[in-house]
Amino acid sequence: MLQGFKEFISRGNAVDLAVGVVIGAAFTSVVNALVEKVLNPLIGGLFGSPSFDNTWVITLGLSGEKAEVLPFAVVTALVNFLLVAAALYFFVVLPMNGLAARRKVEEVEPEAPAEDVRVLTEIRDLLAAQGAERPL
């Protein structure tokens, strides 16, 4: 049983997954700072508030205690999701794709020989084959 566990742990994909989770957790603070400190203030400057939570508030209260329903909190969550996705795409994915494209070594296919070169090569091969068949 311990041997199977050791094999599982030492497999590359388990280690890669662990490293990915740790790096992802560390990178979360970078993306959150970008969204909260850069993009949300821009939205706040354009719309007056970086949050849509209080756009429409429904107050309920039958027993003396008031309860507030904030339906636009869902809109705020969706906007934040889109901001995080956009920040990741434009500041991480696009630059990494550009870097990968620059690093990629394009394999150049050799051009097919011209027809006359191909015919001459066949003639040479036939003459070589005939010369090997004839004894001296």
Image: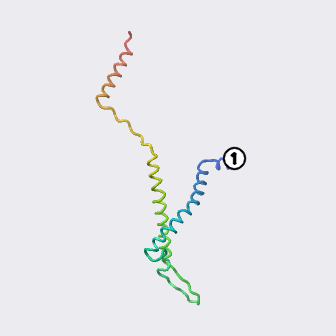
Residue farthest left in this picture: 116
Residue 87: image x %, image y %?
Answer: 48, 63
Residue farthest top in this picture: 136
Location of residue 10 with respect to 85 vertically, above or below = above
Q: Secondary structure at mark 1?
A: helix
Residue 58: image x %, image y %?
Answer: 50, 83
**Residue 104, quarter of the rendered image:** top left
Location of residue 73 with respect to 15 vertically, above or below = below
Location of residue 50 with respect to 13 vertically, above or below = below
Picture residue at 46% right of the left edge, 50% below the top: 99
Number of labels in the image equals 1
Picture residue at 49% right of the left edge, 65% below the top: 84
Give the quadrant of the C terminus.
top left
Judging from the image, the colouring scheme is rainbow
Residue at the disc numbered 1: 3
Mark 1 neighbour density, 10 Å: few (under 14) some (14–19) many (20 or more) = few
| Amino acid type shown at disc 1 | Gln
Residue farthest right in this picture: 2
Residue 100: image x %, image y %?
Answer: 46, 49
Residue 73: image x %, image y %?
Answer: 50, 75
Picture residue at 49% right of the left edge, 57% below the top: 92
Picture residue at 44% right of the left edge, 52% below the top: 98
